[in-house]
Amino acid sequence: MTFFNNTVNLRINDALKYLITKFYISPVTDLCHILWKYFLYLCAMQNIENMDPNQQKKGLANKYGKEELQKRLDAETFKRRTVSLYRYVIIEDPQAFRDKLYEQWDALGCLGRIYVAREGINAQMNVPEPKWEAFIENLNTHKELQNIPLKIAVEDDGRSFLKLTIKVRNKIVADGLDDGSFDVTNVGTHLTAKEWNEAIENDEPIVVDMRNHYESEIGHFKGAITPDAETFRDELPEVLEKLKGKEDKKVLLYCTGGIRCEKASAYLKHHGFNDVNQLHGGIIDYARQIESEDLDNLFKGKNFVFDDRLGERISNEVISSCHQCGEPCDVHVNCANKDCNLLFIQCENCAKEHEGCCSPECISVIHMSEEEQKEYRKGKKNQKIFHSHKRVDLSKRFKE
């Protein structure tokens, strides 16, 4: 008699002997209990031997490393179109919706970062141009995504993303708000680019940038309040404090693509602000509208984007400076030391002189061998701060 098909070819007698020595089980233990224990053990061993980082979502997650992904992207002979989209809509089964999207969009060759939650979807992605029409058709097969507004990138080299990632989250934007405490559907008035320009020029409004400090540093509307916040969660109470006592003033909110202003406008109206407005489609669609309608461009600098481009130019003004030498510059980079990965602004001269690094220590690290870097990292807390975007004074790091 064999035990479990072809996976393991052990006889019951061998199994009993193994269990007695491995698990210290008495020979008088109930045979069924023994066999069940052994079954669980073999299942565990089989999983360990065939461990796959994407095993829980076989075929529904990326399985390639960055180098392989880059090779695949470099070998492509077609162009890609970068697009962002969002919608607040009830999704009954976010996990099933996520899996279906991954299967369909992966088949189309889409790449990007998408968040799905019960409250809706938030996506930044790129689509092969030959598959663009098929992508639009696919969107409309989902009732939750039918006729969803699309924001096409202003500057696009088609290399905004390397892989397709779709994650299920509690919220599509981390805002820290208790949505049950106010009416999230009571949003502000959506303004077109023309209406936005007219309001700025004629109504003496309070203009508020609902993005983080590293975003507004390289570009914003002239005269806008630019909160010194690292996250949207931190920004909301800061904005509320800055606007205290101005509840009857006209308020204009803007962000990258519009999604953050949906919650922010409802939040301000809940706190008594009577004339809350938001830029429809955000900075991305504003750039499209001013070009197509030949309107004045009131935005200065670049629009920060959360993909490998890290920014797209909206106007020719450079309003920020290199964090190392102080020369005019609005190019964000990540430190070449991947264990640091600090997001900062670096000009071409400093990038060359400092080898793309933020500090002398990081330069020394990138010149270590792989083994030396592993030894260097031992006992050190992971210091990656790309996602914390903390302000770091780099002006003196090479002068100390």
Image (tube, rainbow, N blue to C red):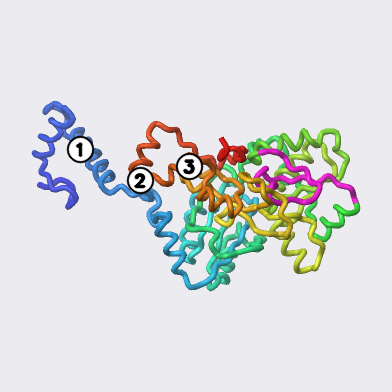
Mark 3 nearby-residue class (10 Å; few <14, some 14–19, many ≥20): many
Q: Which residue is mark 3?
A: 362
Q: Which residue is mark 1?
A: 38
Mark 2 or mark 3, earlier in chain: 3
Q: Amino acid at mark 2?
A: Glu
Is label 2 in contact with label 3 (beta carbons under 8 Å)?
A: no
Q: Residue at x 75, y 56 (%)?
A: 280
Discs 1/2, front: 2
Q: Residue at x 57, y 68 (%)?
A: 137
At 44% across and 42% down in the image, what residue appears? 364
Q: Which residue is mark 2?
A: 370
Choose between 364 and 127: the one closer to the eye: 364
> Tag 1's secondary structure?
helix
First in sequence: mark 1 or mark 2?
1
- State the CA–CA distance, disc 3 to disc 1: 50 Å
Please state the extent of the stretch shown in magenta in the rendering: 203-229
Task: Let me know if residue 212 is in the magenta part.
Answer: yes
The quarter of the displayed image where residue 235 is located: top right
